[in-house]
Amino acid sequence: MLPKKLHKKLENRNANNAFRQLSADSSLVDFSSNDYLGFSKSEVIFDKAHQYVVDNNLKQNGATGSRLLSGNTDLYIKVEADISTINNSEAALVFNSGYDANVGLLSSVPQRGDVIFYDEFAHASIRDGINISNAKNYKFKHNDLDHLEEKCQVERSKNQSETELYVVTESVFSMDGDSPDILRLTQICTTYNAHLIIDEAHALGVFGNGLVQMHHLEDVVFARIITFGKGLGCHGATILGAQNLKDYLINFSRPFIYTTALPPHSLATIATAYQELVTQSDSKESQIKKLEKNISFFLSEYKRLHLHDRFIKSSSAIHCCVISGNDNVKSVAQKLKNKGFNVKPILSPTVPKNKERLRFCLHSYNSKEEISEVLSLLATFVK
Ligand SMILES: Cc1ncc(COP(=O)(O)O)c(C=O)c1O
């Protein structure tokens, strides 16, 4: 029997029309997955990764243990070395997921007496890591760098030289698709001697190797989190930073230490997908270029249909149309689903009440016709 208190919580979810259920909608047109470049279904990546495992005599199903015990391999070392070269970072440490990476970094690095400032819309994995940490933590308003600066100023005026400040944000927000002004962010962190941590989960592959690298700011960012489950279409994540940060995490980050390592075929897939990204960056007919074109077309179509006031401003692959109320947003999503389109409603409490939204994730493989049709339908449903 489910304990009464839990039963009540489920009932409340139902009453708020916010009950979550698993579904598998594979026949619908995909405006929902994070597979921005279609890499998850790339046969080239699949075949190359398989061949790599065979050629290197790594025909092994599991890692056999955590990395500090039996799970580390030469392939891990090679993948981390390649990733740090590609991302222009002194070191890279692979985690089993982006969730693990954020929890592992934020729970172990900021210490008691330190202060963390984080964007109010930061991903759940960032907030979970912060909640485990012994440091004090405060939110700043979403992408509001004046607000962040004010908070840094107040904290530094306390003259507590031992206090380390950490600023945590995302380069592309998962629920809004928008970005902070990264250059100003680094300037604020330099002025107030704060360590900047940036989650690049939704930037990799959409904005090259991430927005930090695109702006040549690698040296002024303390740590970058890159996840492989989105633009790279596979699984896992890495923290990029200095070698001594890597050493620290290997020693103190519990989600790194106390878990079975990734199997060789996962690592081979990560390495192959990264190589594919590098190859495609130089090609004119790449999935990257197709995605860029689809993003521009999506923007021009929603302007043509006079929907632009409803959308949160974004130049990434994530575009959100605000439809206030769980009932309303679910109803529009269902109507689109009935027409064959998979667009996810994002409900409160995942986003603030009255800011519920339809989240369109764009891909290299969406056709112009699909984009025009889904937006035309949306225009009729929200009028
Ligand atoms: C911003 C952000 N960070 C981290 C994660 C977690 O990454 P993963 O799916 O690899 O656990 C996500 C995924 O939803 C995300 O959107």
Image: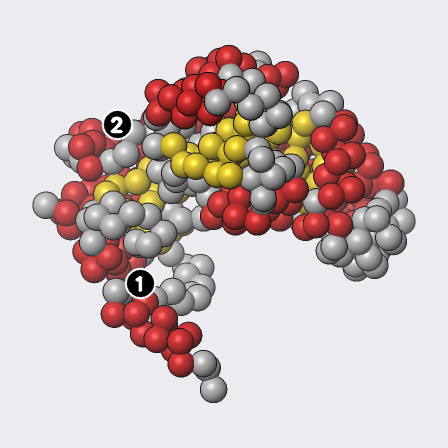
As displayed, is residue 99 above or below residue 79? below
Q: Residues within 10 Å of mark 2 (few under 14, many from 20)?
A: some
| Relative to 180, 243 lies left or right | right
The x and y percentages for residue 367 are 37, 39
Residue type at the position of mark 1:
Ala
| Above or below, 211 relative to 215 | below
Looking at the image, can residue 294 be seen?
no
- Please tell me in which quadrant of the rendered image residue 104 appears: top right
Query: Which amino acid is tagged 2?
Result: Ser
Residue at the spot 58% in from the left edge and 44% down from the top edge: 134
Please tell me whether mark 2 or mark 1 is closer to you in this view: 1
Dot 1: element: loop
Q: Residue at x 26, y 65 (%)?
A: 17
**Residue at coordinates 86% horizontally, 45% vertically from top-left?**
73
Tag 2 residue: 300
Does the image show residue 149?
yes
Q: Is mark 1 within 8 Å of ligand 1?
A: no
The residue carrying mark 1 is 18
